[in-house]
Image (tube, rainbow, N blue to C red):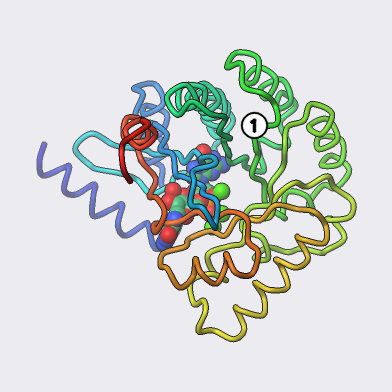
């Protein structure tokens, strides 16, 4: 059994570099994993850029395979998108994140928000709106405390559908964030057309701050644009003090990154939120 286990691992690592989405054994494992409850969520703090107070969390999906370790989301999310499991996983993530954040709030003694990733296939799914309603109703979370992270590509590929769905979200007070802002096929026109609340500046533009003249220029323009359009900004992947200083100084509202908090399991977040416990 050990031998076959090893052989399978070799196959995985070869296919990883070619076509991970066509890795049949990994796909079969994924369906079993849903059944066996191998998926979970971690929560990464999103903090005020100046005070560093935790304002909310991004829910990030994890797949832990017994005996094999963690499968990176970059690997299993595209697979789930291809085989359709993302609808099931995404609905589960949305509901459990809303329920979880209520518990976090109770411990922190103040309101917090939760940011949940929505994939293109979920966004296209007819039941998506019902799932959002269900998540809010069953958790008791206020709609404005839920932020849905979507990518530019989602808006661009079917603007009519996006308009319909986003106006439905707006009427509920559910907020929308553009994830990985600036990295997709985008046009600034959608910032005018759609009711967007937040821009998340991709780590690609953050990681070489403040040394990179180009990244400084890009971040300044994005922050100024967001400010003029009355949008919130979250800088992603903030790893050091220099980046945080720069961003806070340039008026970025919120930051998320290893400097201010890694993604953690709920129990660790609870420890973090308990009053009187120092950081
Ligand atoms: P994302 O939405 O851009 O999420 C941010 C990623 O950056 C996360 O990777 C997070 O762990 C990582 N990160 C946070 N701070 C830092 C930092 O300071 N430095 C560096 N190097 N990385 C940082 P993760 O958890 O591996 O997730 C990767 C991607 O998988 C996510 O990128 C998102 O696109 C997707 N994903 C994760 N969970 C879900 C989910 O529940 N649903 C969907 N549809 N996609 C998800
Ligand atoms: Ca995200
Ligand atoms: Ca992102
Ligand atoms: Ca990203």
What residue is rendered at 62% in x and 61% in y?
Answer: 201
Res. 78 in view: no
Number of residue marks:
1
Residue placed farthest to the top in the image? 138
The x and y percentages for residue 169 are 78, 32
The x and y percentages for residue 206 are 53, 69
Q: Secondary structure at mark 1?
A: helix
Name the foreground residue: 14 vs 53. Answer: 53
Q: Quadrant of residue 247?
A: bottom right
The x and y percentages for residue 230 are 80, 54
Instruction: Look at mark 1 in the image and give the residue it sits on.
Output: 145
What residue is rendered at 34% in x and 22% in y?
Answer: 36
Ligand 2 within 8 Å of the CB at mark 1? no
Instruction: Locate residue 46 relative to residue 124 in the image: left or right.
Output: left
Classify 276 as above or below 44.
above
The x and y percentages for residue 219 are 65, 72
Classify 184 as above or below 246.
above
Residue placed farthest to the front in the image? 276
The image quadrant in which ligand 3 is located: bottom right
Classify 55 as above or below 138.
below
Residue placed farthest to the left in the image? 2
Res. 93 in view: yes
Instruction: Locate residue 187 relative to residue 278 in the image: left or right.
Output: right
Name the foreground residue: 230 vs 266. Answer: 230
What residue is rendered at 70% in x and 20% in y?
Answer: 133
For disc 1, the neighbor class at 10 Å (few under 14, some 14 to 19, many from 20) is some
Instruction: Locate residue 90 relative to residue 183 in the image: left or right.
Output: left
Q: Quadrant of residue 1?
A: top left
What residue is rendered at 65% in x and 20% in y?
Answer: 136
Instruction: Locate residue 214 relative to residue 62 in the image: left or right.
Output: right
């Amino acid at each position: 059994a050990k031998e076959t286990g090893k052989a399978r691992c070799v196959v995985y690592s070869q296919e990883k570099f070619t076509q991970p989405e066509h890795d049949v054994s990994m796909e079969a494992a994924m369906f079993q994993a849903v059944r066996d409850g191998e998926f979970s969520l971690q929560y990464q703090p999103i903090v005020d850029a100046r005070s560093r107070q935790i304002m909310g969390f991004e829910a990030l999906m994890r797949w832990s395979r017994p005996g094999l370790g963690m499968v990176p989301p970059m690997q299993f999310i595209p697979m789930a998108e291809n085989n359709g499991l993302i609808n099931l996983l995404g609905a589960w993530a949305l509901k459990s994140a809303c329920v979880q954040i209520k518990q976090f709030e109770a411990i922190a003694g103040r309101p917090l928000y939760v940011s949940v990733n929505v994939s293109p296939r979920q966004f296209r799914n007819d039941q998506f709106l019902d799932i959002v309603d269900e998540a809010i109703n069953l958790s008791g979370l206020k709609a404005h405390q839920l932020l849905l992270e979507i990518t530019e590509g989602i808006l661009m590929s079917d603007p009519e559908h996006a308009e319909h769905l986003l106006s439905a979200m707006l009427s509920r007070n559910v907020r929308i964030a553009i994830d990985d802002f600036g990295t997709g096929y985008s046009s600034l026109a959608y910032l005018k057309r759609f009711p967007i609340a937040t821009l998340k500046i991709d780590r690609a533009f953050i990681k070489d701050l403040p040394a990179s003249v180009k990244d400084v220029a890009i971040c300044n323009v994005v922050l100024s644009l967001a400010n003029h359009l009355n949008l919130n900004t979250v800088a992603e992947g903030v790893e050091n003090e220099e980046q945080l200083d720069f961003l806070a100084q340039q008026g970025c509202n919120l930051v998320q990154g290893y400097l201010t908090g890694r993604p953690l399991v709920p129990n660790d977040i609870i420890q973090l939120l308990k009053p009187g416990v120092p950081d």
